[in-house]
Image (tube, rainbow, N blue to C red):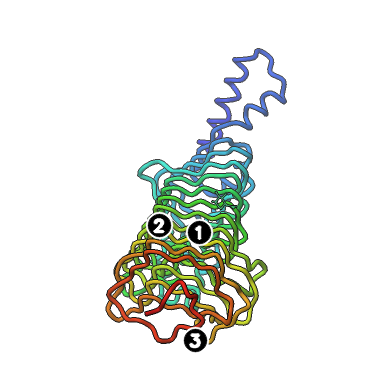
């Protein structure tokens, strides 16, 4: 591992010059704060804990392996340089995992994290066909920042977020190549669960599933997002998991274009849980093929059934400035609530045009109308 060694030796010599007879502990302290450039995945897992800055320089990760940046030393900065890519194998992944506290993850301006998704894409996503690796586990990546990553062609879901106090800013996920022959599927942008204080600003997502999906978590803020090609800004499905609370979530100042849905909340039939203090504000829609605004409580085994139940409550919902157009055979607003489970909704300037109205809505709060 030439590049790492030369860095470590350089620092050790520097320390020796600075202090004529450095105590071993002092040397190791300095080495521990060293800057490491890695050009092979195996070097990363072997030496990551002794680095305070890590440069991932044009690594091709071997088939079936995770680029393992877990348990980093507190305060580590990780910078991607050149093209990072992954060889093909059928497995669950993840292709990349980063954990630690006060970690900064960024990239040089022309770097690319290329998931090589086309090797797996078969139109089936995670429902069948090839076993596809998830892309990026941000699990226990706490008090940390991910900034400016450019990610393309994830085999299936991109971010799996289970963290506390994580800022994700100006990240692009471009799975638009997966639109070819409808081969990309279930390429969720950001899946969030069991998390608190997640802020995602300035994200750009071209994909074939939810731009964002929040299954559980509190104090989540998504702003300035551009979502295209997918399934929209989603909460859910909520219910039937180990954590079934979604609380204090804001989606604001974002656009959803050429997607199945714009704004969506879905909960699981016959499950229990809580969805509360949810705001969708200034969301601009265009080219929506299924539903502009959809809130439904009838999911079973991942699909809507048309029969809602009331065990998961949806309350304290603010819908404001949700505007734009849907396709002419799409439904503008669809609300399917259980008996008494949708309450305390504040609605203003919801103006979705161009599509059909639904006559299948049930238990619609008085502040909104399906027609
Ligand atoms: C709601 O979440 C936002 C964004 O994380 C946070 O700033 C705010 O303090 C939270 N509000 C409450 C009442 O917890």
Please indicate whether residue 61 sits to the left or right of residue 203 in the image. right
Foreground residue among 240 and 107: 240
Assess whether mark 1 and mark 2 are in contact (beta carbons under 8 angstroms): yes
Position of the N terminus, as image quadrant, is: top right
In the rendered view, tell whether residue 312 sits above or below residue 282: below
What is the secondary structure assignment of the residue under circle 1? strand
Circle count:
3
Instruction: Report the front residue among 119 and 154.
Output: 154
> Looking at mark 3, is its residue's CB closer than 8 Å to ligand 1?
no
Q: Position of residue 112 (x, y in %)?
A: 39, 50
Residue hosting label 3 = 306
Between 130 and 276, the one lying in front of the other is 276
Q: Is residue 174 visible?
A: no
Of callouts 2 and 1, the N-terminal one:
1
Give x and y (percent) for residue 89. 50, 66
| Identity of the residue drawn at 41% across and 70% down | 231
Instruction: Using residue 206 as the reference point, say whether residue 193 is left or right of it.
Output: right
Within 10 Å of disc 1 (Cα), the crowding (few <14, some 14-19, many 20+) is many
- 79 w.r.t. 348: above or below: above
Nearer to us in this view, 312 or 5: 312
Cα–Cα span, label 2 and label 1: 10 Å
| Residue 268 at x, y percent in the picture | 58, 77
**SS at mark 2?**
strand
Write down the residue under mark 1. Answer: 159
Instruction: Give the number of the mark in front: 1 or 3.
Output: 3
Kind of element beneath mark 3: loop
Mark sitting earlier along the chain (1/3): 1
Q: What residue is shown with label 2? A: 173
Residue 215: quadrant of the picture: bottom right
């Amino acid at each position: 591992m030439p590049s790492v060694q030369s860095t470590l030796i350089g620092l050790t010599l520097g320390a020796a010059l600075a202090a004529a007879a450095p105590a071993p502990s002092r040397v190791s302290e300095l080495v521990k704060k060293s800057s490491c450039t890695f050009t092979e995945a195996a070097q990363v897992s072997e030496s990551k804990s002794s680095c305070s800055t890590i440069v991932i320089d044009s690594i091709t990760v071997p088939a079936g392996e995770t680029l393992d940046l877990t348990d980093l030393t507190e305060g580590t900065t990780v910078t991607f340089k050149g093209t990072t890519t992954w060889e093909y194998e059928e497995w669950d992944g993840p292709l990349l995992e980063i954990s630690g506290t006060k970690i900064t993850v960024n990239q040089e301006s022309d770097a690319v994290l290329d998931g090589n998704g086309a090797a797996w894409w078969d139109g089936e996503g995670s429902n069948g066909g090839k076993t596809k690796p998830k892309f990026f586990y941000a699990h226990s990546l706490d008090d940390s920042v991910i900034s400016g990553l450019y990610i393309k062609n994830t085999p299936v879901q991109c971010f799996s977020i289970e963290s506390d106090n994580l800022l994700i800013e100006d990240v692009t996920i471009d799975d638009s190549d997966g639109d070819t022959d409808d081969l990309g599927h279930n390429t969720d942008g950001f899946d969030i669960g069991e998390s608190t204080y997640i802020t995602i600003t300035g994200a750009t997502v071209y994909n074939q599933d939810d731009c964002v999906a929040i299954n559980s978590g509190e104090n989540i803020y998504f702003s300035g997002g551009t979502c295209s090609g997918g399934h929209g800004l989603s909460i859910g499905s909520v219910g039937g998991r180990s954590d079934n609370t979604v609380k204090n979530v804001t989606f604001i100042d974002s656009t959803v274009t050429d997607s199945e849905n714009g704004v969506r909340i879905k909960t699981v039939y016959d499950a229990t849980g809580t969805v509360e203090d949810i705001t969708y504000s200034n969301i601009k829609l265009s080219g929506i093929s299924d539903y502009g605004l959809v809130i439904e409580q009838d999911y079973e085994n991942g699909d809507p059934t048309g029969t809602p139940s009331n065990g998961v409550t949806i309350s304290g919902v603010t819908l404001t400035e949700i505007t734009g157009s849907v396709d002419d055979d799409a439904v503008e607003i669809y609300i399917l609530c259980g008996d008494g489970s949708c309450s305390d909704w504040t609605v203003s300037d919801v103006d979705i045009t161009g599509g059909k109205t639904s006559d299948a809505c049930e238990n619609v709060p008085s502040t909104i109308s399906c027609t």
